[in-house]
Image (cartoon, rainbow, N blue to C red):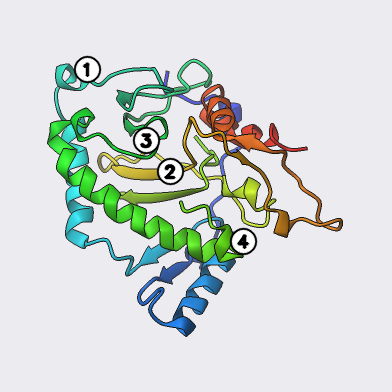
Amino acid sequence: MFLRPLEDRLKDFGTCSDDISVPIIDFAHFGENEDRTAEIVKETILASKEWGFFQVINHGVPKELLESMTKQSQMFHEQDAETKKMFYSRDFQSKPVYFFSNHDLYQSKAANWRDTLYVNARVTNGEVDPQELPTICMDVTLEYVNHIHKLADRILMSISLEPKLTIGLDAHVDTSFITILLQDNIGGLQMITNDMIKGVCHRVIAKTIGRRISIAINYNGFYSSEKIHGPIKELTSEENPPIYKKFSTEGLIKSFFSKSLDEVRANLDDFKL
């Protein structure tokens, strides 16, 4: 069930032998010092264009909160099956909080080895109802989300080529505008920027040294919103025509859940002109 077909394993990414590292961007003094803010914006856009992802330090989220969020997320997953079953669901569209394994179980060639506790704020206009969250991680989740929203605002501001245009908010490509990831020590922006900023293809490799905990927050708009997204007009011209057609958040999310995780790159292709 979990064994990937040989033809898929042969397509695995090669390991780069060069001495390279992920871009690290220091967000200290962002918005406080004009020159430093301009430098952060420059570094962020460069990393987004060339890499599609980067690590942020001095982001304003307390270290103790990061550690507590990771620990209490792990505590939820380590509960007995009967306790977690209260949150289990495969209703990926309307439930605000649910627990599941492999959203693409019936589309993928092999199951991914992971469990997920999902907080679906798309259906609640961005609000998280404390009563819907598991008690074991409720308080820390609310505090963590509050801090991450502030960080997301700064990141979105820094990658917007025009500040007034800022949204305000297996191997696969995330369908969100940005994804902020917290992981333990184990370790859709592409469409609106008309491929100027990349959505990088990435994966997680299972290791033998223990469980991996990661907390991802995806920013991709409200499910019920009538807002239509598309390439930013200021980034298109006769020489650089739109590559992607206009789309709604609902259409994007439904397309994502209709495919296996390793087909998300093709998912983006569905929206190309």
Mark found first going from the N terminus, 3 or 1: 1
- Do callouts 2 and 1 mark residues in contact (Cβ within 8 Å)? no
Tell me the residue at 29%/65% (across/down). Answer: 60
Q: Residue furthest right?
A: 238
Location of residue 155 by image quarter: bottom left
Rendered-image quadrant of the C terminus: top right
Left or right: where 240 falls relative to 164: right
Residue 216 drawn at (x, y percent): 37, 44
Side of 30 relative to 11 (left or right): left
Q: Nearer the viewer, residue 164 or 178?
A: 164
Q: Cα distance, mark 3 to mark 4? A: 28 Å
> Dot 1: within a 10 Å radius of its alpha carbon, few (fewer than 14), some, or many (20 or more) residues?
few
Q: Residue at x 56, y 62 (%)?
A: 164
Circles 3 and 1 in contact, beta carbons < 8 Å? no
Identify the element where label 4 is drawn.
helix
Inspect the image, locate mark 4, and give the three-letter code of the amino acid beneath it.
Lys
- Is there CB contact under 8 Å for labels 4 and 1? no
Element type at marker 3?
helix
**Mark 2 secondary-structure assignment:** strand
Numbered tag placed on residue 49 in the rendering: 4
User: Where is mark 1, residue-wise?
Assistant: 85
The residue identified by callout 2 is 218
Residue 218, percent from left and from top:
43, 43
Q: CA distance from mark 3 to mark 1?
A: 21 Å
Circle nearer the viewer, 3 or 4: 3
Q: Earlier in the sequence, mark 4 or mark 2?
A: 4
Q: Earlier in the sequence, mark 2 or mark 1?
A: 1
